Each structure stands twice: as C-alpha cells, then as structure tokens.
Amino acid sequence: MSELRWNPMLEEWVIVATHRQDRTYLPKTTECPLCPGVLEIPENFEIACFENRFPSLRKDPEEPEIEGDELYRVRKAQGICEVVVYTPEHEGTLTDQSVQKIYNLVRVWKDRYEELGSRDFIDYVFIFENKGEVIGVTLHHPHGQIYAYPFIPPKIRTELNASLKYYNKHNGQCLFCEILRKEREYQKRIVAENKSFTAFIPFFARYTYEVHIYPNQHLRSIAEFDDTTQQDLAKILKNVLLKYDNLFNFSFPYIMVMHQEPTTGERYDHYHFHIEFYPPYRTKEKIKYLAGSESGAGTFINDAAAEEKAKELRDSYPHWD
Ligand SMILES: [Zn+2]
Ligand SMILES: [Zn+2]
Ligand SMILES: [Zn+2]
C-alpha cells in the first residue's frame, strides 16, 4: 500500500508506504545490493544511479486503497525515488572519494536534478545523503538518494515564503545573499571557503556542527552551476567532509540535504541554492536526540554557540589556505 495522506493541521503530506518493511537491513558485504554485478548494478561503473527497489513514491502508483474526503485528503504517491551509488568500492564514505570523483558526482546530481525536474508531475527534486548507523542507514555502501516529490515539501515551502517576503520588502534583495554577506562580514562562523562557495555554521544553527554551504553568487539551483562552480563545490565538500572526520577522529555521521529552486516550471528569483548538514554528534561521545521540545514543539535547543563550534571545525584539518 502506498499513498499520500494530508495532515490538515500542519498542512503537509505524509507518505504512507507499507511495503518498505521488507527492506534489506545492514547486509553482509557479499549480499550488498549496491556492489557491482549484484541486482541492477552493472559490473563496471563509476557512479551508478537507479530507481529505489523499495520506493516511497512511484512513477505509476496504484490508486489509494482508502477513500479520502475534503478534510482527510488522499492522493496517489506519485514521484520518483532514486539511489546514487558513489563508487563500486563497498568500503569507505564520500569523504574518501577524490575531488575528481566528487566533481563527477556533482555532475550526476545536476543531471538528475534537470532530468527529474523536467517531468511535469515533479515539483521538487530533493537530493540528500544519510550517513552512519545512528542516522538509521540500512546499507553501508557509499550512496546518496534523490526523492522527486509531486509537491514542494514543507521545509522548503517555509524557506520560500520567508525569502519571498524578504524579497518583496527589500526591493528584490535575496535573503540568502544577505545571510551570506553577514556571515562573511562577521567571519567567526565561517568554516571554509573558496572562490565560489562559503561554508559556515549559521547564527541560527539547530545542531552543534550544522554546516551550511552557499554559493557566493546568487544561483537558484545546481542547474545554474557552470563548470568552475561544479569543481569548486566538489572541493569545498571534500574540505568540509575531511574536517568533520578529523574533528573527533572518526567517520562523522550526518544528514546532508540540498535546498534549491522547485521544479514547478515557475521561476523563484528569491531562492538561493544551499547545502545543509545535520550531524547528530554534539560532542565526541554525546549524540543529540530529538526529544520533547524539538519533536513536539518544533523548537530546537542547541547547547553550543555556533561561533565556538565553527572555530573547532576551522581548526580541524585541512585548512583551506
Ligand atoms: Zn557494497
Ligand atoms: Zn541569493
Ligand atoms: Zn535551507
């Protein structure tokens, strides 16, 4: 069973996908479905991209089993879920990939964003990676995912609304460009930078080591990245990922997400591409759990100041110059 159910109080869709219970859970290396030659993965590949075998959203979904009404709206779970396998090597993480390899991955992301976004039933292409068992990762093989939704997800919607309000109030000024200007001026929350990108822990971070990466230029989506920008994204990603791993000398778990222009066909001049990392570790030993205030009220408690934590990451190897 697979369908979308509307929450009329939060005004957001919930994906109900009961078939996902049988997913492969932390298989032995010999049974890894993302290794070359297993399942639909070819023997020889650099980066492989294919549809998830246990998708939450489908291109040709079945009709919902349950009948909806005006309040309890129901919709077909139409969309596309893809898996992006970063490398044929089972061991390792994105951090271990060369800058060249990460650059190739950036090109794959751009291609998938454009291709999936061009479908008329896709309103938002969401590129992300869950890394580490504490995040609930079910396969160790280095990989990320893409969810192409038939709607604009609530978090993006909130950012779109806020940035549109700002844009209208400030004669077409971009909210994100202004945040970037403030962070670059203040300096203390910056973690790394290069010609095209700035990585920083924002003033308003929810997580202790929450790094955001913004292009220095006003670019709405990865589709607008030229070749230099794509290379620079690979470089700053490699840099931030190494800093994470070197911070406590273990492979640092995180959720990495890409926020960019929806693919509804409209133009969102007020929106600005960025990447956000949510790492669960708040110290070398302690993990941040989403508890009462976060889960029940939506208000995060961050027990560290971004200024201090950014310094730790800035001092963590490698230094950018
Ligand atoms: Zn594998
Ligand atoms: Zn901007
Ligand atoms: Zn965002």
Image: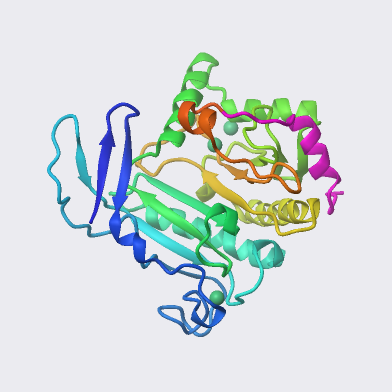
Percent across and percent down for residue 114 are 43, 54
Is residue 54 visible in the rendered image? The answer is no
Percent across and percent down for residue 204 are 64, 27
Which quarter is ligand 3 in?
A: top right
Q: Is residue 38 left or right of residue 29?
A: left
Is residue 261 visible in the rendered image? The answer is yes
Residue 209 colored in magenta in the image: no
Q: How is the image coloured?
A: rainbow
Magenta part of the chain = 300-321
Quadrant the N terminus occupies? bottom left
The residue under the point 35% across, 42% down is 265
Q: Residue furthest top?
A: 169
Residue 318 colored in magenta in the image: yes
Percent across and percent down for residue 3 are 24, 49
136 lies above or below 161: below
Residue in the foreground of this view, choosing between 239 and 279: 279
Q: Is residue 53 left or right of residue 133?
A: left
Residue in the foreground of this view, choosing between 203 and 7: 7
The residue under the point 49% across, 52% down is 127
Q: Quadrant of residue 202?
A: top right
Q: Is residue 80 left or right of residue 164?
A: left
180 lies above or below 242: above
Percent across and percent down for residue 27 are 50, 74
The residue under the point 31% across, 39% down is 13
Mark count: 0
Q: Quadrant of residue 267?
A: top left
